[in-house]
Amino acid sequence: MNGENPIVLVDMDGVLADFDGATQAHLESLEIPIRERNNFYYRDDYPEANYTDVINKLHASQNFFRNLPPVDGAIEGWDKIKDLGYEPRICSSPLHTNEWCKEEKLKWIEEHLGREAMKSAVIDSKKELYDGIALIDDRPEVKTSGETTWRHVVFDAPHNKDSTSTIRLNGWYDPDLPAVLRYCMEHSKSRL
Ligand SMILES: [Mg+2]
């Protein structure tokens, strides 16, 4: 990384780290029936109090974020962004109900993506404060309090089918990754 390549911001949960997969495995271990993922927040698919409680406790537990498996193809995808001449940078919201979240995310990044990725990572929910040409994020609508330089690339997931964003990446093996980033490069907004 030379600090001059266009920055591509990359979300963690649901994009690099398999938050949903780990949650589903936990529910299965408790023999809780698996449902379709229609809502961004897992608990909204399981509104019954006993289920919500199980999910909230899991997400608030120590080592949950540390031990998330990588999403299929995520590490290769990260390297592909670099090979295409961009500079990937983590931009991830902390989960405030988990006191270990931020430090465990940083350890996860260092383990799976290396020290440079850890040092440049942003763990902050105010994603509009960080510049880039693209933000690859599975959230259907990234709510911001101001203008952003980046374009939201929706990382495809069952819970974001209704996103209004027109730019979509169908997983890390999507052959359109170069075209998607080129489009973002051409349509990103500079701060004047
Ligand atoms: Mg996410």
Image (tube, rainbow, N blue to C red):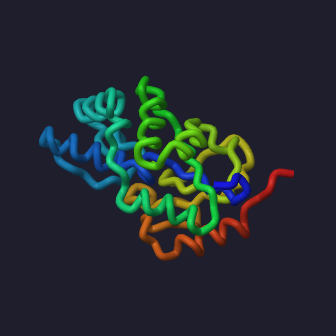
Q: Is residue 140 above or below residue 171?
A: above
Answer yes or no: is residue 157 visible.
yes
Q: Foreground: 126 or 111? A: 111
Residue 31 spot, x, y in % from top left: 12, 42
Which residue corresponds to the image point at 44% horizontal and 68% vertical from the top-left?
170
Q: Residue at x 58, y 36 (%)?
A: 124
Q: Is residue 161 visible?
A: no
Q: Say which residue appears at 43% left-offset and 52% top-offset.
A: 16
* Location of the N terminus (image quadrant): bottom right
Foreground of the two, 104 or 11: 104
Q: As drawn, is 19 to the left or to the right of 121?
A: left
Q: Position of residue 148 (x, y in %)?
A: 71, 50
Q: Which residue is more in the foreground, 39 or 76?
A: 76
Q: Residue furthest right?
A: 192
Task: Determine the residue positioned at 63% across, 66% down.
Answer: 85
Q: Quadrant of residue 127?
A: top right
- Side of 39 where 134 appears, left or right: right
- Location of residue 63 in the rendering, given as x and y in whole percent from the top left corner: 32, 31
